[in-house]
Each structure stands twice: as structure tokens, then as C-alpha cells.
Amino acid sequence: MKSRLLKLILFVFILPLSFITFQGASADDSDVYYAKIEGEISPGLYKYIERAVRTAEKGGAKLIIFDMDTFGGRIDAAMDIGDLLTKTDVKTVVYINPNAISAGAYIALNMDEIYWAPNGKMGAATPITSDGNAADDKTMSLWKESMRDSAERGGRDPNYAEAMVDKSVSLPENVKKDGELLTLSASQALEIGYADGIAENLSELYQTLGIDEGKIEEVEKTWSEKIAEFLTNSIVVPILLSIGSLGLVLELYSPGFGVPGFMGISALLLFFYGHFIAGFAGYESLILFIVGLVLIILEMFLPGGILGILGLGGIILSILLAGKSVVEMAIYLVIAITIAIAAMVILMKYFGKKIQIFNKLILRDSTNTEQGYVSNKTRTDLLGKVGVSITPLRPSGTALFGNERIDVVTEGSFIPSDQKVIVVSVEGVRVVVREYKEEE
């Protein structure tokens, strides 16, 4: 017990050391830099693109090329990336290879030049919520105007950008059918001015731009940026929070500190690490989390409930403060708690008897007759005995059997006092009688 507690305390206090990040080696000075935009648009991806832009600026670059393949992601991260690209003095070129869908389309429109792979696609940019429904009117209006503004600043017709968000926008029949969102092909983009050129591959793109391929400096993702990008994924976040909440709940009901506790704390640590690297969570969130964790640990040794409630509140508050939006984190928490509850029900129902820890959560013992427990004496010895009613039975009353007064009940009929009765059944403490007739 003491060794487990010591390990737990050591684990909690070395926790902040894991949040020290190590940057990758800086790229050498070059005229052209290259970076990838792939996977989900997330806060972690923003940190990588920001470093790529800052590295190019520091190196005095004239151009930075982004190789894009994404089906979109978070619009807040996309807008941050778009703002970053707009403000830099380094010329930006995007190569759609092959997808710039949803939030990816917005990022592409904020580049100085757009080049396409022959099978490139861009559009379908209607924002949706985490539950798969269309965003509210305010979000839709903001996103639509942002798309139009990005297209206009690049000298492109904003109506096409708006049609990627709003299916009601009318365009020529050869570009988009009525009632559908716009998704451009490479040839269509070239025709309407949304493409500065089409290149079969990166080598052809470099030739088109007049760049010596051997002098291009690639900005590679650091291990911490890769981890942060994964940990801030909209699917991974609720999973981490679910594991964290489930692990801590199980730990509260198990003696000492074991596997569930380490799993729960590790999951929450990964959550905070990803959001810390992404720039959302500060040390105040981490400190609040550690304080809440310590209070929960103290609750194990100083029962009373108050410390546990304060600790749980501290952890929830730290999670809410760790995201860019409190509302968004609250939604993630609700999803996580729902998943955790469902997981608990499933585990208890199907694996409860096999997993030892659930014996601490569920009372399985029963006090039954087979094990020798008797809550009330069963008077089966009275069956067939004849007695006398000493009170009217309406239908319940009292009868005398020998020298013993017994509470009885009839089968439904009325029996006056001083009448002979016979016991016909005994159901636990319920003794049922009927009027006794001599022929019986």
C-alpha cells in the first residue's frame, strides 16, 4: 500500500516535466521551403504550419510551398492558419494533391497561388458540428463571409467560394447543379481562375515555378507536433477523456492505486499534453488538474466526500480551460461521460463476475435460505392444524392454536370469532385459514 502511494505521489509531481517540449533542428537558410498539409485540420497542425512559416521568414525565404491533401477539420484551426498565411510576407503556394475539401478549401484560398494535381478536388465546405449536423446560422454566416473574403483577396470570383458553402448559390450549369454544393475539379478551377496551373507532380510544379529541386528545404514535423496533431483530433479527444474518467472512477472504488488509476491519469495527461503543445492549455490548467488529482487521492485516506467533490470539480474545470472554447470542451466532456457510463454498464453486465475490480462496485452477496439466512420464521409446522378464531377474521385477525396466538388471514371469506379454523397454507409469514368443518 505504501509503495503504491509513493509511486502515485512521484507520478503526480513529475507530471509537469513531461510538458517540456523539444523543438526539432532549425532548417538552414534557403530561398524555398516545403511543408505538408495532410490529415485533419486541427490545432496541432496549426502549430506545425506556424513553425514552417516562421522558419521560412527567419531563413529569408522568397517562397514556401504547401503540399495539401485534406478532407477538412476544425474551422477555428483553419481560420487561424488562414490568418497566419495572410500576414506573412513570404510568398505562399499550395499544391492540391489531390484534396482540399471543406476547411482545406479555405486554407487554399488564403495562399498567393494555387496549383492543382490533375485529379485535384476543392470545395464542399459547409461547416458541420461534432454530431454531424449543420452549423448554426451565425457560424454559417461567418464561414461564408470568410470564404468570400479569402477568394476576393486572392483576386478570385467570391461567388464560387460562397457556392462551396451554400448550395442555394446559382452558378453556370457546367460548373454546379442547382441544390448542390460546389466541388471543383482541376480543369474547372483552371477555367474559372481558381487555379494558377496544373502539374502532374511536384517535380513538374518545381519546373513551372522555376525552382531548383535540390535547393528546396523541407520543414518536417517534430515528434511533439505529430503527437499534438493526433491528440487534438476531434475523435481522439473524447476517447482520452472517456478513458480518463472511467479510470479515475474505477480507481476510487479499488483499494490502493493500480492499473485503472494509471490509465485514467495517463489518458488525461495525454489530453493536456496535446492541448499544451497546440497552445490552448497553459500551466494554470495543468496546476488546477494536479491540485484536483491530489484532492481525490486525499479522499481515499480522509473519507468524507468534500475533498473528492472539490477534486473532481478541479479536474473538470481544468479540462474546460484547456481548450480554445469552453463550450466545445463541455460538449467533449458530455460525450466522454456518456461513453464512460455506457462502458461501465457493458463491463458490469458482461464481464462483472470475471473482472475482480467490479466486485468492489457491485454488491453480489445475498442472504438466502440456502445459505442459512432466515429473515422471518416460516411456520410450516402449522399446516393442517385446527385452532379457534379469537377475533373476527375480516379477512385477517387472530386465532389460537393450542396456547399460541397466531395472526392469520382467510381465503377471502368472513369468519366470526369463536369458530374453529384450519390452516390450509403457509406463505412465508402469511398463515391462511378457512372455517373448519367436522367432516374435514
Image: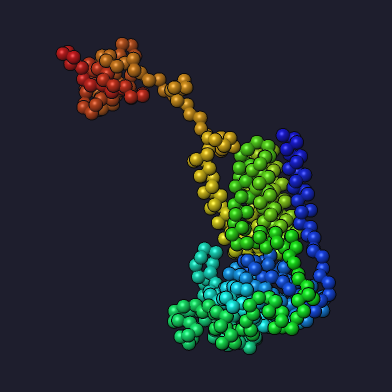
Q: Residue at coordinates 25% horizontally, 17% vertically from top-left?
A: 422
Left or right position of 16 against 165: right
Asked whether 366 or 76 is in front, the reply is 76
In the rendered view, tell whether residue 298 sits above or below residue 112. above
Residue 356 is left or right of residue 266, and the answer is left
Q: Residue at coordinates 59% horizontally, 59% vertically from top-left?
A: 235
Name the quadrant of the C terminus.
top left
Residue 325, image quadrant: bottom right
Q: Residue at x 50, y 70 (%)?
A: 134
Q: Is residue 241 left or right of residue 418?
A: right
Q: Residue furthest top?
A: 402
Question: Up-down: is 152 above or below 23?
Answer: below
User: 240 or 294, which lies in front?
Assistant: 240
- Image quadrant in which the N terminus is located: top right
Residue 185, x across and y down, in percent: 55, 79
Q: Return the x and y of residue 15 as percentages of the image width and height.
A: 75, 51
For image coordinates 33% across by 24% down, the residue present is 427
Q: Position of residue 61 (x, y in %)?
A: 79, 79
Q: Nearer the viewer, residue 323 or 379?
A: 323
Q: Nearer the viewer, residue 437 or 30?
A: 30
Q: Is residue 221 above or below residue 145?
A: above
Is residue 209 at all visible to an observer of this figure?
yes
Task: Spot the residue most to the left.
Answer: 439
User: Residue 93 is drawn in which quadrant?
Assistant: bottom right
Please say if 361 is above or below 120. Answer: above
Q: Quadrant of residue 187?
A: bottom right
Q: Locate residue 319 relative to residue 127 in the image: left or right.
A: right
